[in-house]
Amino acid sequence: MRITSLAKAAFGAALVLSLAQGALAQGGPLPYGAPITLAQAAKVMAGAEAEARKNNWNVVISIVDSGGHLVMLHRMDNVQLGSVDIATGKATTALKMRRPTKVMQDGLAAGGAGWRMLTFYPGIVLVDGGVLVVEGGKIIGAIGVSGVTSEQDGQIAKAGADAVK
């Protein structure tokens, strides 16, 4: 049992170290850019909604700008009300941490040093479904999705973020 705990702690530390090294190798984390425009947000929303509909998944899709302000929110039919706050929380978390929420989900799942993420700030959402929207190498916003499994939420969010490229 102790070996498993040590292995999890080592994996968590390695994950955090690899994230830091990856950011340094790329010249640091991506910078924030101008806020996403309404037209860009509409493209992101359309890409995400198309992915959700293709799979018959009803979700909430939330898009925030590079300053963390809500630009667009879409709640599909018959989605639990809690997903509104969760989707926006995923978008905001990805934006503030400058990385997809999946990275933090994996760090938390590894245990050990990854658990320190629970102390970051109130309202942080540490599950897949939050993705940065990037244009010209700068963060212009983020998309968050909630309503199905976290992996499916992430798939939809990625489709939305990719639509602006």
Image: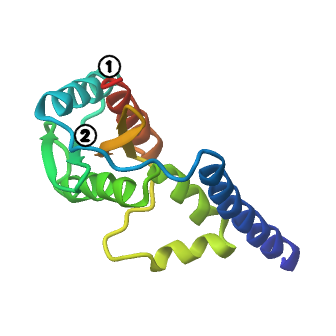
Q: Position of residue 130 (x, y in %)?
A: 38, 48
> Which residue is outermost to the right?
3
Q: Is residue 115 left or right of residue 5?
A: left
| Kind of residue at disc 1 | Lys
SS at circle 1: helix
**Quadrant holding the C terminus:** top left
Q: What is the count of numbered marks? A: 2
Q: Position of residue 121 (x, y in %)?
A: 37, 76
**Quadrant holding the N terminus:** bottom right
Q: Is residue 100 left or right of residue 79?
A: right
Dot 1 alpha-carbon crowd within 10 angstroms: few under 14, some 14 to 19, many 20 or more = few
Q: Quadrant of residue 123?
A: bottom left
The numbered mark at residue 54 is: 1
**Distance CA(mark 1)–CA(mark 2):** 12 Å
Residue at x 78% of width, y 75% of height? 5
Q: Is residue 140 above or below residue 90?
A: above
Residue at x 39% of width, y 46% of height? 129
Which colour assignment does the render follow? Answer: rainbow
SS at circle 2: loop
Q: Is residue 49 left or right of residue 95?
A: left
Q: Earlier in the sequence, mark 1 or mark 2?
A: 1
The numbered mark at residue 59 is: 2
Q: Is residue 58 above or below residue 50?
A: below
Q: Position of residue 77 (x, y in %)?
A: 13, 37
| Kind of residue at disc 2 | Val
